[in-house]
Amino acid sequence: MSNLHRIAGNILGKFNAFKGSRPAMDNGKILIVRGFVPDTIDMEKEVDEILDEIIKSYKGEEINVVSDEAGKLINKMDEQVRSSVNVNATTDPNGVLRLVKDFESRGITVKYRMFTMAGAGVFIVIWKDTNNAGPCFIEVTVSGSE
């Protein structure tokens, strides 16, 4: 098991979302895993605490998604994706905020964190219906250092 898998697995485990999770991409440089959170989770009361605890447990440094550092990490992740997949669009460092606004306009609450840690950059996104009804989904992206 690679370090990328270990990190993603631990994060998914914090949300009890490991079972049934599937990699959307796994090329050795970047791992993107999507999963389903089977437990009832309150997006307003629990998720922020869990995300903050994850960063703390990895001794990570949170990155504001509207910063030069975030832009660098997003560009790196984009390059790692493009090393395996042909993408016919330019990198969009502001795509995270656009995604959140789009989800919120559809009645979906989104929580996310981006952070760096020894040997990796991590981006976690969790989304669920604003009324806390229905399923909760998670995507974890772990980018290895080159």
Image (cartoon, rainbow, N blue to C red):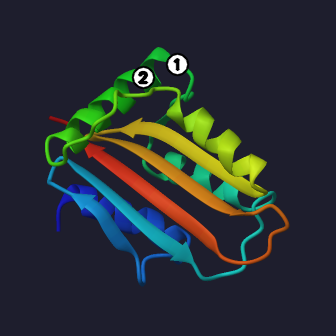
Q: Which residue is drawn at 81% across and 61% down?
A: 130
Count of labels shown? 2
- Quadrant containing the N terminus in the rendered view: bottom left
Image spot of residue 56 (x, y percent):
53, 47
Quick one: 47 or 88, which is closer to the camera? Answer: 88
Quick one: 116 or 134, which is closer to the camera? Answer: 134
Q: Which residue is drawn at 80% across and 57% down?
A: 44
For this view, does 133 lie left or right of residue 121?
A: right
Q: What element carries label 2?
A: helix
For this view, does 141 lie left or right of residue 67?
A: left
- Report the disc number at residue 67: 1
Image spot of residue 102 (x, y percent):
67, 44
Task: Relative to 60, say whether 24 is above or below.
Answer: below
Q: What residue type is labelled 2?
A: Gly
- The residue labelled by disc 2 is 71
- Quadrant containing the C terminus in the rendered view: top left
Quadrant of the rendered structure where residue 47 is? Answer: bottom right
Q: Which residue is drawn at 51% across and 33% down?
A: 95
Quadrant of the rendered structure where residue 4 is? Answer: bottom left
Q: Which residue is drawn at 19% across and 48% down?
A: 85
